Image (spheres, rainbow, N blue to C red):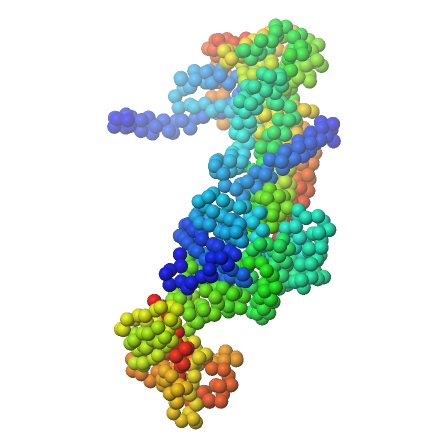
Amino acid sequence: MTRMRAVLLALVLLTAAPVSAQELALSVAVSMKEATEEIGRVFTKTRPGVTMRYNVGASGDLQKQIEAGAPVDVFVSAAARQMDELEGQRLIVTATRRAFARNTLVAIAPGDSTLDLSRPATLLGARVTRIAIGNPKTVPAGQYTEESLRALGLWDGVRGKLVYAENVRQVLDYVNRGEVDAGFVYATDAATRAGRVKEVFRPAPDTYRPVVYPVAVIEGARQPALAAAFVELLAGAEGQAILRRLGFAPPPPGSR
Amino acid sequence: MSPESLSALSLSIRVALLATALNAAIGIPLAYLLARRRFPGKTAVDLLVTLPLVLPPTVTGFYLIVLLGRRGWLGGPLYSATGWSITFTWYAAVVAATVMALPLLVRTARAAIESVDRDLERAAHTLGRSEWRTALEVTLPLARNGIIAGLVLAFARALGEFGATLMLAGNIPGRTATVPLSIYTAVQTGESGEALGLVALLTGLSCAVLLVAGRLGARLH
Amino acid sequence: MGGPRTTPQSPPGSARLQVAIGKHLPGFALDVRWTAGDGVAVLFGPSGAGKSLTLACLAGLVRPDAGRIVLDDRVLFDAAAGVDVPPQRRRVGYVFQGYALFPHLSVAENVGFGLRDRPKAERARRVAEVIERLGLGGLEARRPAELSGGQRQRVALGRALAIDPALLLLDEPLSALDLPLRRALRDELRATLADLRTAAVVVTHDFTEAYRLGDRIVVYEDGRVVQAAPRSELLWQPASEAVARIMAIPNVLHGTVVKATPDRIQLRWRGQLLEAVNSPARAYLPPPDARLAFFIRPEYVRLIRKDRGLADPTHHMNVMHGTVVEEMDFGTTWMLRIRLDEPGEPAQGAFDLEVEVPHLVYEILEIERDRRWEFSIHRGSIHVLPG
């Protein structure tokens, strides 16, 4: 590096240092990872000196962490239930809670699979030996999948073939690697591995509750103002445009 | 105790017993070879056997998937030929437990074998015993206590195996959810009562195993 | 491999065991050649000289790099021909230095260990026979840990003998025992070995043991054989100063040759003119003024009684005068260190000669009080060491 550049870098670091004490910490559900990061980049572009810190995981895990006192400012959940529980314990700033996106369940299969999986009932076929879903106990996507499969009358038939994953990305990984014959993920997840997995069908939307993503500022956040501003961005035009592009639908009216 | 807990316990014990039996079959001869023979590639074998002890269990789990997964080096051909894959079955739990516990057995057994006076083996040779028979009649019986201690340690390790099991076998209740995995799920879902029960179970079992190992170790001296 | 001055060995026809082997180890090279006939051959020498290594080669436990081992016309090893009979098939009985008894087996099981391929009845019979013979009756069910040192040694011997070996090897069979036991067992071992017709090779670093147990002694130093001879020959005619040193012979001295004939050698030492015997068979004739090594056995120096007047030349040869400068009490004997009445540096530090006198003589001659002595040495007691 040339002398001049070195000096400039030092200057930037020195001047930036005291200002970058502004860090916004977010706990983000796995399926919202890419979207949140992209919106975060937009957020920091107009706020020099602010850095984003993302803690990504299954909504259930994230909820537990917040209950245990994790120092985060914003919680982006993949299901209402986790947010409801936190709200019940007064761990979020209720006034800031909103639903900002909606996702769709899709069934996927390995890209090179030769099985006919065009309809839900094909999951009962003998050649389908393993189906990956998120663990319904802890993964919202798994809960929705179970709900849908029950509504379709397939739950008992496929139960013995189910392989539980710890989060949606793991389901995607199992399908991607060919370890399972099919899996259930969100449409937005399937998009990230477009080449290696293929969508085979979408369970009818009326077989499961809407997959609504709530966001809220955590009670006792260190950066409440910044947090609130981020939530606004998420729900606002710019945020929504990005979400649309990534495959998310707008939240159902009246949801929070 | 809930039926899930009982099924997890029964699965864990089955897996640990089978893993220990496999380890005995592979590990004792391996320990003997490492203790008494020189052969090309010995250092590599020694390293390979010790790796699961020092690598994070998830790394070992990763290697097992590469090897045994549906598209793995060994698992792939198997799946193409038979339509069957070991992943997400309780056999995978056995494999994970075996691999993770093997180094414990091999190291302990090897030390026990190395401590047997080589003059005893030489005496047996002059008295007509082949190397193989000498191992069976002299070396291994005299290393017996150390070998048993190694097996007990391996059993305890297999019982508590988590990381590699999770990766290769998944956490499927009733099928591959061993006690450690069930504890993990119980904690994640906030079922602290269930978790506590399982923790107490595993602790009790491990203490019993350690006590036995300690007694055997004392008898060695 | 044994120099030109090695004493002649038994004629090849009577040699039951022929050994000629070489082996290279880091920092050590073994290169030995010797033979043994009937009776007991002893490999004698300091620790680390290669004796135990040789035994291991004889047993087939170690593979030499080169050479040949033949026992009773059976080739056990031949590097050139690619023959290497495994230890299991050599029929060699080996008594290890620490006995190597199987701690998890009883005395009877230890003794019978090599008899596995015999029918059960015959095995039991043979075991009983060996146990009886070695005085181990009553101990059949005991474990080695419950036995005394002497009993363990006998079990080790019994185990080796039970297989009716063609060759018996004993590695320091007595060194693990304490002194009184060692002497008792030494004689017992001698008797047992004499009874057997088996060829035996014993390793020891103790000369008394070597002398007592062996008929033939092969002296090892640094991986080589420096002398192989019947035991008396070794005792009285060590082949060189090096051998004398290994045997820890005292009074190894150096003088100058005056004249040498096949029967006698005249030499000058510390101003004295001494006469020693030579051995015509040895054909050792050093030129005058040559440097010479010789030794005088301490127990053969005769102090001359003062009440009997001057020394009689026919009885007393090599007469010298000296003073006792040091003395050591060994219980049954006294060791005196005498400095000659001769100017100049004494030959061995503060003294010239070590003289051994029995207690009785010490008291009668009142050596404690009277320190000045005249003494003589018969020419046959001055032994010349070829250089």
Of residue A224 and residue A22, the one placed in the foreground of this image is A22
Q: Tell me the residue at 54%/44% (across/down).
A: B36
Q: Tell me the residue at 52%/9% (across/down).
A: A247
Q: Quadrant of residue A81?
A: top right
Observer able to see residue C267: yes
Across and down, in percent, residue C363 comes to 49, 87
Q: Quadrant of residue B136?
A: top right
Observer able to see residue A143: no
Q: Is residue B109 above or below residue A144?
A: below
Q: Is residue B198 above or below residue B37?
A: above
Most extreme residue toward the left is: A3
Of residue C293 and residue B58, the one placed in the foreground of this image is C293
Of residue C69 and residue B191, the one placed in the foreground of this image is C69
Quarter that holds the C terminus of chain C: bottom left
Q: Tell me the residue at 54%/46% (across/down).
A: C86
Across and down, in percent, residue B219 comes to 65, 51
Residue A236 as seen in the image, left or right of residue C273: right
Residue C320 as seen in the image, left or right of residue C230: left
Q: Tell me the residue at 58%/66% (across/down).
A: C190
